[in-house]
Image: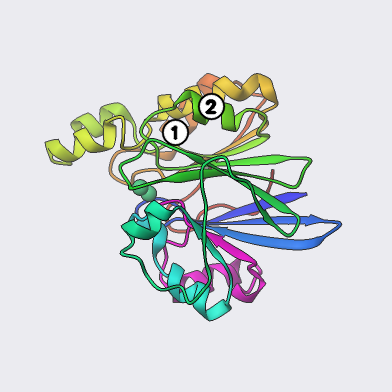
């Protein structure tokens, strides 16, 4: 069984715990670590966990809202930290004290009874990866921070029962909002972030392959609203798919993939 919980989502910091329970025991992976160490410890406690229960850390890319206390946490807990070589270079080649593991597109990672499949996404970072997680029975897709859906992304997500999916902005709110012109271009561009409708189209494309649940994540505080993200997903997916919206500061409840 796979459960997961967003501990925070969006520009204030992204972190998601993925838990697998099975024959091999209980495994916990933290996907991204864009919070300060005290906040992370507090959110883990609120989730009923201790940081020492984490088995590994996966960093999707080097933007500040995803790396936060990654180095501090990995070294304190002596856990491996996976990221692409480009992400490590983009972070300024920090010393992880022998705990760094290099992740690549299409190279599966086994963390006890949890299998992670990283894949390349178009986003304005050095070598960003997003991922699917499976216990062999159910697959959870984690897809935040991408500018547009490539065929590669869609192929990798096919068969996911649950998606934690970026719904970054509402196009009209971004257009009319307070961002300067260059930032509107960046966020709305092919290497920025997904609009609600783009995210909904991604989910819709894998709907026939068994999608059951979507958690809208990485919502912009300035350029989106939870009700707009939810409405775009419901429009595209209908009533058969369960929809949740992760809150920026507090994330989501524990959910089963
Ligand atoms: Zn981000
Ligand atoms: Zn980013």
Location of residue 22 (image quadrant): bottom right
Asked whether the residues under the numbered discs 2 and 1 touch, taking CB atoms below 8 Å apart as contact, a structural biologist would say no
In the image, residue 6 lies at what x, y percent?
54, 54
Check disc 1 and report its element: helix, strand or loop.
helix
Q: Residues within 10 Å of mark 1 (few under 14, many from 20)?
A: many
Q: Residue at x 48, y 77 (%)?
A: 97
Location of residue 144 (image quadrant): top left
Q: Identify the magenta region.
A: 32-61
In the image, residue 172 lies at what x, y percent?
27, 27
Mark 2 or 1, nearer chain start:
2
Note whether ligand 1 is within 8 Å of mark 1: no
Q: Which mark is residue 229?
A: 1
* Residue 58 painted magenta: yes
The residue to which callout 2 is attached is 154
In the image, residue 32 lies at what x, y percent?
48, 57
Q: Residue at x 50, y 74 (%)?
A: 73
Eyeballing the image, is 257 above or below 170?
Answer: below
Q: Residue at x 53, y 71 (%)?
A: 99
Decide if residue 177 is in sight here: no
- Distance Cα–Cα, label 2 vs label 1: 20 Å
Eyeballing the image, is 255 above or below 76?
Answer: above
Eyeballing the image, is 125 above or below 48?
Answer: above
* Residue 188 painted magenta: no
Check disc 2 and report its element: helix, strand or loop.
helix
In the image, residue 106 lies at what x, y percent?
57, 40
């Amino acid at each position: 069984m796979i459960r997961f919980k967003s501990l925070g989502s969006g520009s204030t910091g992204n972190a998601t715990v993925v838990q697998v329970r099975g024959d091999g025991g209980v495994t916990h992976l933290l996907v991204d670590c864009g919070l300060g160490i005290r906040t992370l410890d507090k959110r883990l406690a609120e989730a009923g966990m201790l940081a020492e229960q984490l088995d590994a850390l996966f960093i999707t890319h080097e933007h500040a809202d995803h790396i936060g206390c990654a180095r501090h946490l990995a070294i304190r807990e002596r856990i491996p930290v996976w990221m692409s070589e480009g992400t490590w270079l983009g972070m300024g080649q920090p010393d992880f004290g022998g705990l760094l593991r290099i992740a690549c597109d299409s190279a599966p990672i086994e963390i006890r009874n949890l299998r992670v499949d990283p894949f390349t996404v178009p986003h304005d970072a050095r070598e960003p990866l997003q991922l699917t997680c499976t216990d062999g029975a159910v697959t959870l897709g984690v897809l935040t921070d991408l500018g547009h859906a490539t065929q590669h992304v869609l192929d990798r997500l096919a068969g996911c029962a649950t998606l934690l999916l970026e719904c970054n902005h509402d196009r009209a709110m971004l257009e009319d909002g307070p961002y300067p012109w260059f930032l509107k271009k960046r966020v709305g561009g092919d290497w920025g972030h997904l609009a609600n409708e783009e995210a909904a189209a991604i989910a819709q494309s894998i709907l026939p392959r068994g999608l059951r649940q979507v958690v809208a994540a990485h919502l912009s505080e300035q350029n989106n609203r939870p009700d707009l993200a939810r409405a775009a997903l419901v429009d595209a997916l209908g009533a058969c798919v369960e929809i949740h919206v992760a809150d920026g500061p507090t994330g989501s409840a524990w959910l089963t993939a």
